[in-house]
Amino acid sequence: MQVTAKARGYYGGGIKEIGETFNIAKPEHLGSWMQPGKELPEAVEQKYTGYVAARGAAGKFVVKDAAGQMVGAFTGNKAEAEAEADRLNAGGELNPPPASDAPPPGGGDQDDDNGPDA
């Protein structure tokens, strides 16, 4: 019986690579990593759904990735967060966090008396 490897596997004394076509001795030898026939079906591109809306602090919603980590700088209501997650799942780019107008930690160049800091 002629089969094609859907995943890397071992059969007949050797490693079979994905897409490799070979013969198996018995139909009972058909493994889960094998597919009958000479070709693999065309791969169907799956939609990545790794971004979800999640409740953040103070009743606001944020967008989290599949690992549960907050992504981007988005905060808003539930409908807005779901729309943002859908946009990211459709292949949209993450928006960078807004630039802060606050002085850098330690005060920056605001100390102009040239004396020692207390």
Image: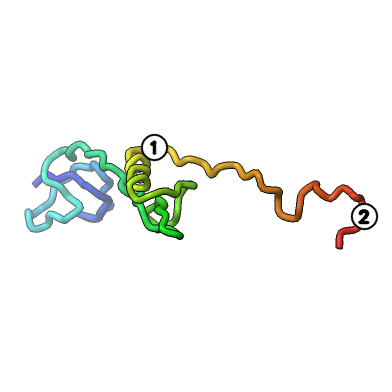
At a point 77% along the width and 49% down the height, the residue shown is: 108
- Quarter of the image for residue 68 reads bottom left
Residue 31 at what x, y percent from top left? 16, 56
- Quarter of the image for residue 41 reads top left
At a point 8% along the width and 47% down the height, the residue shown is: 1
Q: Residue furthest bottom?
A: 118
- 27 vs 42, left or right, is left
Foreground residue among 16 and 110? 110
Amino acid carrying mark 2 in the image: Gly
Mark seen at residue 115: 2
Q: Secondary structure at mark 2?
A: loop
- 22 vs 61, left or right, is left
Q: Vertically, is 93 above or below 74? A: above
Residue 44 at what x, y percent from top left? 22, 39
Amino acid carrying mark 1 in the image: Gly
Foreground residue among 64 and 4? 64
Point out the image quarter for the C terminus: bottom right
Question: Which residue position holds label 1?
Answer: 92
At a point 13% along the width and 51% down the height, the residue shown is: 24
- Quarter of the image for residue 59 reads bottom left
The residue mark sitting in front, 2 or 1, is 2
Q: Secondary structure at mark 1?
A: loop
At a point 42% along the width and 58% down the height, the residue shown is: 56
Residue 9 at what x, y percent from top left? 25, 54
